[in-house]
């Protein structure tokens, strides 16, 4: 395709496509027929009813899924159970060519999908390792895993889409190349941040106990000892097994849940920022603001102004980050309670 025509097509296409059917955007045929190297789409269902969906990945592309919110899901690849339980914001899953995927969502879900052609994977693999045989390419194993770099790159796609970035398809391809190179690097170095570093992972029933305890006491100080006690483990064993099961430290998971609750309160109540901070377990508004900005990319005040439709100024660039359900990245914060 001539360069001008290619750029005209890129300008006309959105960066992120809707999915009328799970993992099946209407633009997917652009990958299967070779017109595009990557198509990015988003599957969102915000009701609380269970949803059982299936999709088959054609033999010419991979599907990379990045979770945008906390979800409860049973996931199967080619009939094999891969995951059953909680999926945290930022976790990813890769389905290879020819694999049939099935998901049972038990409640709201929001997922970003990158449908990446074998040709693009081959290009990236050739640049990284000198191998260019698409028929032999498999990325990582299909189990859910966590990587902050890929989470951040997914965030970049959402921000650019909400900002109305020009050359959507070209932009999507550039960011997808960065994600692919990261996946290849993780696969090569066996450094995938899935938390599976030997040692036992926390069983699902213990994870449920920990999550239920956090949800019930989110407005109070929550220590590592109290969380461990809720699961019947010592602090050391609980921390190690929780991270092995989820890919996150208990402290980081707790912060994510507090910010998730804070976003809901900011949009659905008239509570002041101090009241919201106290309601979700922060001791001061300053600490709340620092952590909120680290996750979401905006201060609570700016985020509320940009996203609260009840307010006359609920528009502008501040809305870019807010639609990313999982927020940005957290770092450890040393406090008395985790």
Image: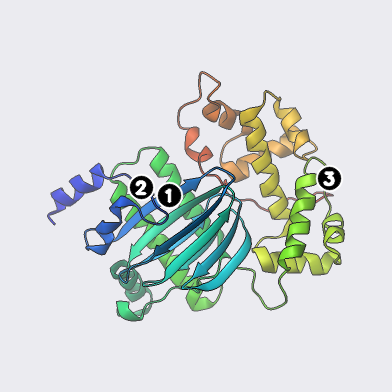
- Going from N to C along the chain, the mark reached first, 2 or 3, is 2
Residue 173 percent coordinates (x, y):
33, 56
Q: Nearer the viewer, residue 53 or 284?
A: 53
Image: 263 above or below 234: above
Label 3 sits on a secondary structure element that is loop
Quadrant position of the N terminus in the picture: bottom left
Q: Which mark is residue 221?
A: 3
Give the quadrant of residue 303. Answer: top right
Q: Is residue 42 left or right of residue 250?
A: left
Residue lying farthest top?
312
Image quadrant assignment for residue 225: bottom right
Q: Secondary structure at mark 1?
A: strand
Q: Which color scheme did the rendering employ for the protein? A: rainbow
Q: Where does label 1 land, which residue?
A: 42
- What is the number of the mark on residue 17? 2
Kindly report the distance in space between the C-alpha atoms of the residues bearing marks 3 and 1: 36 Å
Q: CA distance from mark 1 to mark 2?
A: 6 Å
Q: Earlier in the sequence, mark 1 or mark 2?
A: 2
Q: Is residue 111 left or right of residue 246?
A: left
Residue 235 numbered tag = none
Residue found at x 57% / y 36%: 298
Q: Are marks 1 and 2 in contact (CB under 8 Å)?
A: yes
Residue at the (64%, 51%) spot, across then down: 330
Marks 3 and 1, the one that precedes in the sequence: 1
Residue 104 image position (x, y, % from top left): 54, 59
Residue nearest the viewer, comparing 64 with 127: 64
Q: Nearer the viewer, mark 3 or mark 1?
A: 1
* Label 1 CA crowd tier, 10 Å (few <14, some 14–19, many 20+): many
How crowded is the residue under tag 3: few (<14 C-alpha within 10 Å), some, or many (20+)? some
Label 2: few (<14), some (14–19) or many (≥20) C-alpha neighbours in 10 Å: many
Determine the secondary structure under disc 2: strand
Q: Is residue 133 above or below residue 71?
A: below
């Amino acid at each position: 395709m001539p360069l001008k025509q290619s750029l005209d097509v890129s300008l006309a296409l959105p960066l992120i496509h809707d999915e009328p059917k799970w993992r099946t955007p209407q633009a997917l045929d652009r990958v299967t027929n070779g017109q595009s190297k990557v198509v990015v789409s988003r599957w969102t269902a915000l009701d609380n009813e269970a949803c059982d969906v299936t999709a088959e990945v054609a033999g010419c592309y991979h599907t990379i899924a990045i979770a945008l919110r906390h979800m409860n899901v049973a996931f199967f690849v080619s009939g094999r159970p891969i995951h059953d339980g909680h999926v945290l914001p930022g976790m990813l899953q890769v389905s290879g060519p020819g694999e049939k995927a099935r998901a049972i969502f038990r409640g709201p879900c929001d997922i970003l999908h990158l449908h990446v052609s074998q040709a693009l994977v081959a290009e990236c693999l050739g640049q990284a390792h000198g191998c260019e045989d698409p028929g032999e390419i498999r990325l990582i194993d299909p189990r859910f895993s966590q990587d902050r770099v890929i989470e951040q790159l997914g965030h970049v796609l959402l921000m650019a889409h909400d900002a109305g970035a020009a050359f959507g398809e070209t932009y999507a391809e550039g960011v997808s190349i960065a994600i692919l190179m990261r996946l290849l690097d993780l696969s090569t170095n066996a450094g995938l941040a899935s938390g599976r570093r030997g040692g036992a992972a926390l069983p699902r029933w213990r994870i449920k106990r920990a999550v239920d305890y956090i949800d019930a006491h989110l407005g109070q100080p929550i220590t590592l000892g109290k969380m461990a006690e809720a699961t019947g483990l010592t602090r050391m064993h609980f921390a190690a097994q929780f991270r092995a099961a989820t890919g996150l430290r208990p402290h980081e998971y707790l912060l994510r849940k507090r910010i998730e609750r804070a976003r809901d309160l900011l949009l659905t109540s008239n509570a002041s920022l101090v009241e919201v901070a106290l309601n979700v377990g922060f001791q001061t508004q300053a600490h709340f603001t620092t952590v909120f900005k680290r996750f979401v990319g905006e201060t609570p005040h700016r985020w509320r102004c940009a996203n609260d439709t009840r307010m006359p100024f609920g528009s502008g660039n501040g809305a870019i980050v807010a639609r990313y359900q999982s927020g940005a990245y957290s770092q450890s914060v040393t406090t008395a309670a985790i």
